Image: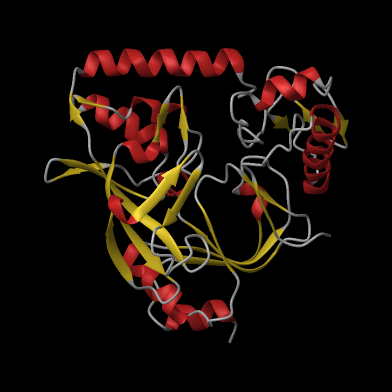
Amino acid sequence: MNMADQLRLEGLRGELRLDEPLVRYVSWRAGGRARRLYRPADLDDLSLFLARLPAAEPLLFIGLGSNLLVRDGGYAGSVVLMHAAGRHPELLDGQLYAEAGVASPKVARFAARNDLAGAEFLAGVPGSVGGALAMNAGCYGAETWDIVERVLTIDRHGVQRQRSATEFETGYRHCALKNGTARLGASEWFAAAWFRLVPGNGAAARARIKDLLARRVATQPLALPNAGSVFRNPPGDHAARLIEACGLKGLTRGGARVSEKHANFIVNPKGVARASDIEWLIESVRATVRERTGIDLVAEVRIVGDAA
């Protein structure tokens, strides 16, 4: 009996795939395979799956696969795929509730349709709610934790717990529990959030979203596989300005390239880049900027897995 059959016999309702190519699930369309990939039917099913895993099993959660690079050797553990196209935000007790796998732009559009203001910026966040929470994603002057009331987390044992926003320390592309008893992304993950929004004008919110998206299309290489901004902006400056000033736009390795449209993006124009090509560009850009400006850029992108 293989592991898939065994797990199903233990009452799981989700979909388990073995030796699954992760290029299908990451926005760079590059990288290796997962030893196991599980798409839970719902959060209770996810709890059961986590409870069945060995304690030492490496575990990776993926939403829309942005801000993530999986090395060509793949991930020797279990990957949980949180995103599901059929999942949508909803209104619960006057607050907007969304599971971690819901795409952030869906939250913005849902809020606008319900005459709620404050979530428009999420239309410009190219990922899911879980990722937005984990890195306090933001754009155009607003950040995710500005509007979070409370969250639902899930731990290695499948235990779900609600936590107030006051339990977290947040900052620019940063989120951590204040007491340090659990490491988010290592032993506890975001499963859902309740957003604190205010009554607004739906038409005005939709116009704001339209404007934000037009700005993104005009300034970012959205037509090509990418993972969003590669580096955080250093204090008082912009990573893209530094990269461009160092003459690195268009720098190429294999099938990957530093975007000519936005220097803080690395693109995979033909979908043939290896993860090693992308990682080489990340390290080369960082080293060059450090050598020429003295500024050590910090990557937003998470790099996981084994080299080929």
Extreme left residue here? 93
Q: Position of residue 219 (x, y in %)?
A: 60, 15
Q: Is residue 31 above or below residue 77?
A: above
Q: Is residue 102 above or below residue 293?
A: below
Closer to the camera in the image, 6 or 125: 125
Q: Going 51% across and 34% down the picture, which residue do you hit? A: 126
Q: Position of residue 128 (x, y in %)?
A: 45, 43
What is the quadrant of the C terminus in the image? Answer: bottom right
Q: Position of residue 9 (x, y in %)?
A: 43, 83
Q: How many marks?
A: 0
Give the quarter of the image for residue 156: bottom left
Q: Is residue 303 above or below residue 77?
A: above
Q: Going 38% across and 66% down the picture, which residue do you hit? A: 154
Q: Does residue 195 appear left or right of residue 77 in this picture?
A: left
What is the quadrant of the N terminus in the image? Answer: bottom right
Give the quarter of the image for residue 94: top left
Closer to the camera in the image, 63 or 244: 244
Closer to the camera in the image, 161 or 296: 296
Q: Is residue 146 above or below residue 221?
A: below
State the scheme by which the image is colored.
secondary structure
Q: Does residue 204 appear left or right of residue 3 in this picture?
A: left
- Residue 42 seen in the current view: no
- Residue 24 seen in the current view: yes
Q: Going 22% across and 33% down the picture, which residue do you hit? A: 197
Q: Position of residue 29 (x, y in %)?
A: 68, 42
